[in-house]
Amino acid sequence: MKSLNQQFRYKSLLFLFLLGLIWSCKTDSKATRVEIDNQYVTAIKKDQIILESGDVFDLPVTDSSFVYYLVRHAEKDTLPKDNPRLTEQGYERAAKLYDMLKGTRIDAIYSTFYMRTMETVDSLADAKGMKIFPYTPQGFKELHKNIVENSEYRRILVSGHSNTTPVVANYLYDKNHFQSSFDDKDYDNFLIVVDNGPEEKSLFSLKFKP
């Protein structure tokens, strides 16, 4: 039989090992939070972000949270100039967006009333049996008012433009995080704003590929 000293030493080592493991997990979680921006997303599943790297990040949500998924429309054609449709690559990106979000809760889908923004989200809307609510590119306050007044809508997808999506994100986040529009050739941006109250808002600036 082991002596009392040996048993004590064994239990002490085991305790230190477990303590180190817990601390390591906490450190990894913090590192993931810091490094998650600008990473590529492959899926959102039940409030978890699945990254291209294989890492999984839990969104800081509660039952009363508002979660906004913000995307710019996918790649657009050049004609007609006033209201072009998506290109072949744009339809591929729209299909990727559908694949990313099909496994998570979406309560409402909003889009400006243009072919390119509507086509970016219509596959997801059809799959979930939802209609797309229109909003005007300048109607950020009205958009937010419509959302918060309907308590059933707490997971919202918003399809916009290179010059509106950053502004909507700033408005929802209540901070001037983005200082300019997205580059006109940049379609990768995928933003998430989590609203847990006036002093508890988070913004995640991510990306996705077609």
Image (cartoon, rainbow, N blue to C red):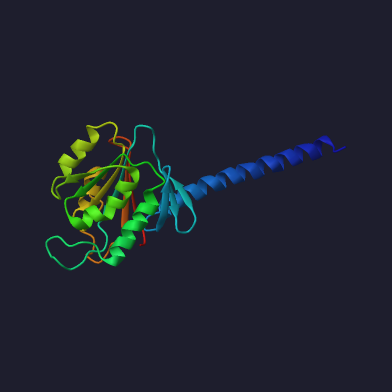
Residue at the image position 29 percent from the left and 66 percent from the top: 88
One can see residue 188 in this view = no
One can see residue 44 in this view = yes
Q: Position of residue 56 (x, y in %)?
A: 48, 50
Residue at the image position 48 percent from the left and 47 percent from the top: 29
Above-or-below relation of 120 to 104: below
176 with respect to 99 (left or right): left
| Quadrant in which the N terminus is drawn | top right
Q: Nearer the viewer, residue 127 or 170?
A: 127
Residue at the image position 39 percent from the left and 48 percent from the top: 102
Quadrant position of residue 179 = bottom left
Q: Position of residue 155 (x, y in %)?
A: 32, 40
Q: How many marks?
A: 0
Q: Position of residue 72 (x, y in %)?
A: 25, 56
Q: Nearer the viewer, residue 95 or 5?
A: 95
| Quadrant in which the C terminus is drawn | bottom left
Q: Position of residue 208 (x, y in %)?
A: 36, 59
In the displayed orientation, state which residue is furthest to the bottom.
78
Residue at the image position 70 percent from the left and 42 percent from the top: 14
Q: Nearer the viewer, residue 137 or 107?
A: 107
